[in-house]
Amino acid sequence: MAVEQRWVYPYSDKKDDCLFCDPTMGGVTQHVASWQGWNERGRAGNLAEIVFFESKGIKVIPDSLPVKENGHHVLLVRKPHRTAYAQDEDVSGEVIDIMDRLHDETGKQWIFAEHGGGMPHNGHEEKSGNQSVWHAHGHAIEIDDDGRDPLRFMKEFLRQEGWHAQEIPVLNCDPIGAIRIHYDGNPYAFFQYGSAALWVVDREGTMKSMLTQRAMSRYHGEELRWKDIPKDPRVAEIATRRLMNLLSRCGGTGLFTTYTP
């Protein structure tokens, strides 16, 4: 049964000052510029320009600081400028297809998480604290079968930050369908693993940014933040090493076929 779309985004499909709308505006990604493999692959520009896979409405790019030392962590970026997957066009089928491809290629379970933005008010965009890049993007993170429950971990992480997460079902492996059912126009956090997800509404826009990266990097070891890369050489080194590992595995077949426009 289709979900009625009540939330129409009143802006154009491209925003001039948005990195995900125009990755070239970010310049060269400095923390990987010194890696020899960067130029060998013809990737001397911004990391956001690398597209592993794209469908009609989504492109898949690497995260700037993968949460796993040896593993996959990618972003599913909406092509038109939106602030949430809940807004406007329903891309449920595309996300399901991409997540299925990720599972089939790696043989692992995956998390899908989004820090969704609220609707604009008073004729202009009001940014909220739960998005570092003000453009709809979901995190897809490969999870090892080690007996731990990432959903339970995330629920406790949110509790420690002062949020009560509601557990909601994800029917037919459709995270976007679940998001669209629950969206009420406010910023939100969504965190799916398997057939269940956590849902938090951030009515005041006060949720800390980099939620998924902070939580899932702690889940895998040390809590890290990509905003620390320019000011902390150690974090920059970790990011470069993890990206080298990710990119070296992502030039082959299936989802991780390098896209050349």
Image: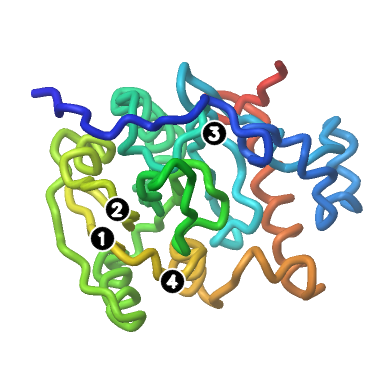
Q: Callout 1, which amino acid?
A: Val
Whole-percent x and y of residue 177?
Answer: 21, 35
Q: Which residue is mark 1?
A: 201
Q: Is residue 78 or residue 35 the one in the foreground?
A: 78
Residue under the point 74% across and 50% down: 244
Q: Callout 3, which amino acid?
A: Val
Q: Which mark is residue 219?
A: 4
Q: Is residue 31 or residue 90 the one in the foreground?
A: 90
- Image height of 78 relative to 123, above or below: above
CA–CA distance between discs 4 and 1? 23 Å
Within 10 Å of disc 2 (Cα), the crowding (few <14, some 14-19, many 20+) is some
Which of discs 2 and 4 lies nearer the camera? The answer is 2
Residue under the point 29% across and 53% down: 186
Q: Is residue 17 or residue 90 the one in the foreground?
A: 17
CA–CA distance between discs 2 and 4? 27 Å
Q: Is residue 88 left or right of residue 73?
A: left
Within 10 Å of disc 4 (Cα), the crowding (few <14, some 14-19, many 20+) is some
Q: Callout 2, which amino acid?
A: Asn
Q: Which residue is mark 2?
A: 186
Q: Which mark is residue 187?
A: none
Residue at the far front: name it: 122
Which of discs 1 and 2 lies nearer the camera? The answer is 2
Q: Secondary structure at mark 2?
A: loop
Quadrant into which the C terminus falls: top right
Q: Callout 4, which amino acid?
A: Tyr
Q: Secondary structure at mark 3?
A: strand
Q: Secondary structure at mark 4?
A: helix
CA–CA distance between discs 3 and 2? 25 Å
